Image (spheres, rainbow, N blue to C red):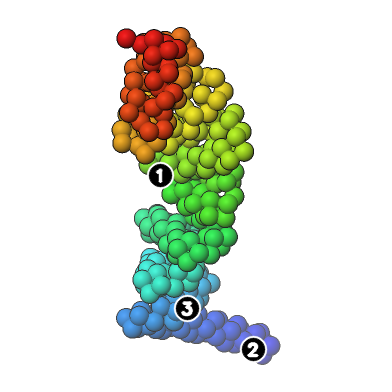
Amino acid sequence: MKRVKTFFAVCIITALTFVTAYGQDMEAATELYNAGGKALSESNYVAAIDSFNKALKMLETLTAEDRGDDGDALIVECKNIIPQIHLRYGKELATSGEIDNAIVQLKKAGETAKSYSMPEVADEAEGLIPQLLMVNATNLLNGGKLPEAIAGFKKVIVADPSNANAYLYIGLAESRLNNEDAAIVAFEKAIELGEITNSPRQISTIYLKRSVAATRDKKWADVFSNAKKANEYSESANGFKLIGLAGVQLKRYDEAIDALESYLAADPDAKDKSSTIYNLAVSYEAKNNNAKACGYYKQLLNDATYKQVAEFKVKTTLKCN
C-alpha cells in the first residue's frame, strides 16, 4: 500500500512539474514578444526579428490547450509582424544605399509573407526586388563596370522576366564591349517586350557601323545589306545615303534612286548634295529615263566639281532641252 501511495505521489509531482514548465514557456514567449515590440519601437530590426521569431517558435511548440487564447493571439501577431519588419528594414537599407542587404531582407519578407498568408506584403516585397537590382546594375553600368553590370541586369531578368529595360541596358553594355552580336540579341528581346523607343535605334546604329566599315574595302554588297538592315530598324539619312551609294555601284538603280531621293529629302542641305545629285543623274540615265537624268545633270551645271561632265551630258550625250 505504501508503494502505491508513493507512485501516485510521483505522478502528481510530475504533472505539476509539466504545468509549471508549460507556464514558464508561455511566460518566456510573452517576454520575447514584448522584447520584440520594444526593439521594434527603437528601430532595432535585427533584435526585433530575432525576438519575434523565438517567441513564435516557442509558442508553436506548446499545445493549443497550454497556449490558450492569449498564446494563439500572440502567434497571429508574430506572423503578422515578422514579414512587415523584414519589409520595413529592407526599405530603409535601400534608402541608405545598402542594396545587397536590402534585397536579402525583401526576399525574407516575401518568403515569410507567403508562409504566413500575407499576399499583399509578399507582392510589395517581390515587386521592390527587381527595382533595387535594376538600380544596382545601372550604377555598375554608369561606373563603367560592364561585365558586372550585365550580370546585374541578368539578375533583374530572373526576378522580372518581362523587364524590357534590363535587356536594353544589357545591349548597351555589350555594345560598349564591342560584342555586337550579343548586343543585337539583347536589343531584339527588348523590342519583343515592348521597348521600341531606343532599342531599334541601337540596332540600326550597329548595322550602320558595319555598313560604313565595308565602304573602306569597297565591299558594296555588305555596304548595301547592312545599311538596308539599319533602316529596317530605324530609318536615317545616313542609312539612305549608304543604300544609295552601294545601289549605284551594284547597279541596283531603282533602290539607289529611292534611297538617294529619300536622303536629299531628309537632309536637303547635305554637304555631299552635289555628289548625290550626280549619282541620281547616273542612275536615271542607266534606266534610260533621260528626262529625269537631264533634270539632275542641269542642277550641276554651275557646280565646280561636276560642271564639265554635266555640260557634256546635257549638250552631247543626252541632248537635253
**Does the image show residue 70?**
no
Q: Which residue is mark 3?
A: 50
SS under mark 3: helix
- Callout in the foreground (3, 1): 1
SS under mark 1: loop
Q: Nearer the viewer, residue 321 or 6?
A: 321
The answer to the question of whether label 3 and label 1 lie on touching residues, with beta carbons closer than 8 A, is no
Q: In the shown orientation, is residue 227 left or right of residue 219?
A: left
Q: CA distance from mark 3 to mark 2?
A: 44 Å
Question: If you read the primary sequence from the N terminus, does the residue marked by circle 3 or circle 2 appear first?
Answer: 2
Report the residue at 65% width, 85% height from top. 7
Residue 310: give x, y in percent of width and height: 40, 22
Question: If you read the primary sequence from the N terminus, does the residue marked by circle 3 or circle 1 appear first?
Answer: 3
Which quadrant is home to the N terminus?
bottom right
Q: Which residue is mark 2?
A: 6
Report the residue at 32% width, 9% height from top. 321
Question: If you read the primary sequence from the N terminus, does the residue marked by circle 1 or circle 2 appear first?
Answer: 2
Report the residue at 40% width, 69% height from top. 94
Residue type at mark 2 is Thr
> Disc number at residue 198?
1
314 to 123, vertically: above or below: above
Residue 294: give x, y in percent of width and height: 37, 15
Q: CA distance from mark 3 to mark 1?
A: 47 Å
Report the residue at 50% width, 64% height from top. 144
**Does the image show residue 310?**
yes
Q: Nearer the viewer, residue 118 or 186?
A: 186
Residue type at mark 1 is Asn
The answer to which quarter of the image holds residue 147 is bottom right
Mark 3 packing: few (<14 Cα in 10 Å), some, or many (20+)?
some
